[in-house]
């Protein structure tokens, strides 16, 4: 019989956290505890705790019973309007959860930290590509870096190890999260189609032909658990990507074909502006096509769409370090988009 490990997934409802939970469940030898403010419905090996991690007292109180935890998978996130404002809440949540669990979990083995290409300054403008894990840092404020520095300091003299996982844009089908490219494209395409429009790339013209890598949330979950359970991976960072590259000018016409739409030349249209007045239309579409009744705001992360479609520079990392160390899975990005759109249709999120 396999020995049971106990995982805490922090950010259980997120596009990353929810896939981590599904992946851990599929192993069969993990007890899983999901943390978030919204909580969830317990099932099988998964138990949910509703906790506000910004509140250190609430964290201590609600997490005091988690004495059996062996692994913490940190994928919580608080969105804020500026890069500087991201630091305080995102650092506080990590500090509160680590302090609360570390003090009671005597057999803690690993803390996994979900990061991203902000570590490489990818959000500011053209950065060195392919980005490597040991590339030099950039001027703070940068919450990912502060979080990693906290873990490095906290780990000194302890028997547990940490890993930092760096995905590109993450593709998954969770709802109600501020960064979800798959939903942006799916809802934008569905509404364009309903209005009888062709599918136009709405981003910067210069973004249409640049190279981009993507990280499938399922692949990311596998890599995250691989790094957290492989002693050779302790105390270091890993870029995790699908393994191929895309250009929108190649993929966009194929996405239009998937939705059975014509494609037209790109036109830069801020989604935050042109999609802001589509709530009524979306509600009518939900009735017309019998869609699940999720509020428009929970299926649309337009600021994130504008952000991703503004990258008029190459945006990719070198993913070979994880491969050299034994993680050999890959995902074909084109197929991934279509299979995630299929899933949105099956779940009644977009018209079939
Ligand atoms: N999404 C991407 O494309 C992407 C790409 C690269 C890197 N990343 C990084 O990956 C990390 C996770 O991102 P994500 O997109 O998965 O985030 P997400 O979908 O927004 O999920 C965030 C999770 O954190 C929970 N949370 C937020 N505030 C909380 C609080 N005060 N107390 C307890 N739980 C709280 C949320 O649940 P409740 O709202 O219920 O509390 C949710 O479960 C971030 O550091 C992000 O920068 C994301």
Image (spheres, rainbow, N blue to C red):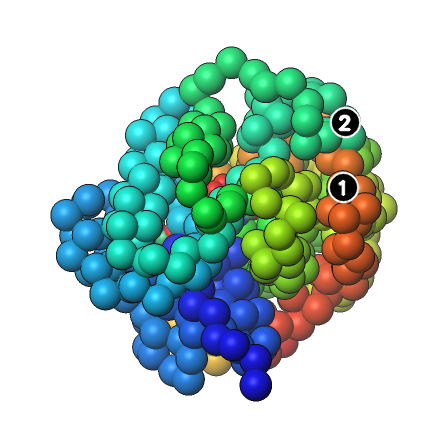
- Residue 338 versus residue 41: which sits nearer the camera? 41
Disc marking residue 321: 1
Relative height, residue 22 to residue 116 (above, below): below
Relative height, residue 144 to residue 288 (above, below): above
Secondary structure under badge 1? helix
Identify the residue shown where x is 35% and y is 35%.
91
Where in the figure is residue 294, as x and y percent of width and height? Answer: 39, 67
Q: Is residue 212 left or right of residue 70?
A: right
Q: Is residue 336 left or right of residue 97?
A: right
Q: Is residue 124 left or right of residue 200?
A: left
Where in the figure is residue 30, as x and y percent of width and height? Answer: 49, 73
Name the residue carrying label 2: 129
- Residue 66 versus residue 129: which sits nearer the camera? 66
Crowd band around label 1 with a 10 angstrom C-alpha radius: few (<14), some (14–19), many (20+): some
- Measure the C-alpha gap from mark 1 to mark 2: 15 Å
Number of numbered tags placed on the structure image: 2
Task: Specify which label sits upstream in the sequence, 1 or 2.
Answer: 2
Which quadrant of the structure image shows residue 27? bottom right
Rendered-image quadrant of the N terminus = bottom right
Relative height, residue 173 to residue 188 (above, below): below
Identify the residue shown where x is 78% and y is 30%.
130
Which quadrant of the structure image shows residue 126? top right
Rendered-image quadrant of the C terminus = bottom right
Q: Is residue 196 visible?
A: no
Identify the residue shown where x is 51% and y is 46%.
161
Crowd band around label 2 with a 10 angstrom C-alpha radius: few (<14), some (14–19), many (20+): some
Q: Is residue 215 visible?
A: yes
């Amino acid at each position: 019989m396999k020995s049971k490990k106990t995982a805490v997934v922090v950010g259980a409802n997120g596009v990353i956290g929810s896939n981590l939970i599904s992946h851990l469940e599929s192993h069969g030898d993990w007890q899983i505890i999901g943390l978030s403010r919204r909580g969830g419905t317990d099932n099988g090996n998964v138990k949910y705790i509703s906790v506000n991690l910004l509140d250190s007292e609430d964290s201590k109180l609600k997490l005091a019973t988690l004495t059996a935890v062996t692994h913490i998978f940190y994928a919580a996130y608080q969105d804020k309007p500026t890069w500087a404002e991201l630091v305080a809440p995102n650092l506080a949540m990590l500090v509160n959860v680590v302090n609360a669990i570390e003090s009671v979990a005597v057999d803690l083995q690993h803390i996994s930290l979900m990061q991203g290409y902000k570590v490489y300054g990818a959000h500011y403008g053209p950065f060195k590509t392919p980005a490597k894990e040991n590339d030099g840092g950039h001027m703070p404020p940068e919450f990912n870096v502060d979080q990693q520095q906290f873990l490095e300091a906290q780990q000194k003299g302890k028997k547990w190890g940490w890993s930092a996982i760096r995905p590109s844009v993450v593709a998954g089908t969770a709802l109600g999260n501020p960064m979800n490219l798959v939903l942006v494209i799916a809802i934008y395409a569905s509404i364009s189609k309903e209005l009888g429009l062709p599918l136009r790339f709405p981003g910067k013209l210069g973004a249409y032909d640049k190279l981009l890598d993507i990280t499938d949330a399922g692949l990311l979950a596998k890599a995250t658990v691989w790094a957290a359970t492989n002693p050779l991976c302790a105390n270091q960072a890993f870029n995790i990507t699908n393994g191929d590259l895309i250009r929108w000018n190649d993929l966009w016409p194929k996405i239009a074909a998937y939705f059975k739409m014509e494609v037209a030349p790109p036109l830069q249209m801020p989604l935050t502006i042109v999609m802001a007045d589509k709530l009524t239309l979306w509600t009518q579409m939900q009735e017309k096509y019998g869609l699940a009744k999720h509020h428009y705001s929970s299926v649309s992360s337009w600021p994130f769409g504008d952000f991703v479609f503004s990258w008029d520079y190459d945006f990719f990392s070198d993913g070979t370090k994880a491969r050299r160390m034994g993680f050999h899975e890959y995902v074909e990005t084109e197929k991934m988009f279509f299979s995630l759109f299929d899933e949105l249709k099956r779940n009644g999120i977009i018209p079939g």
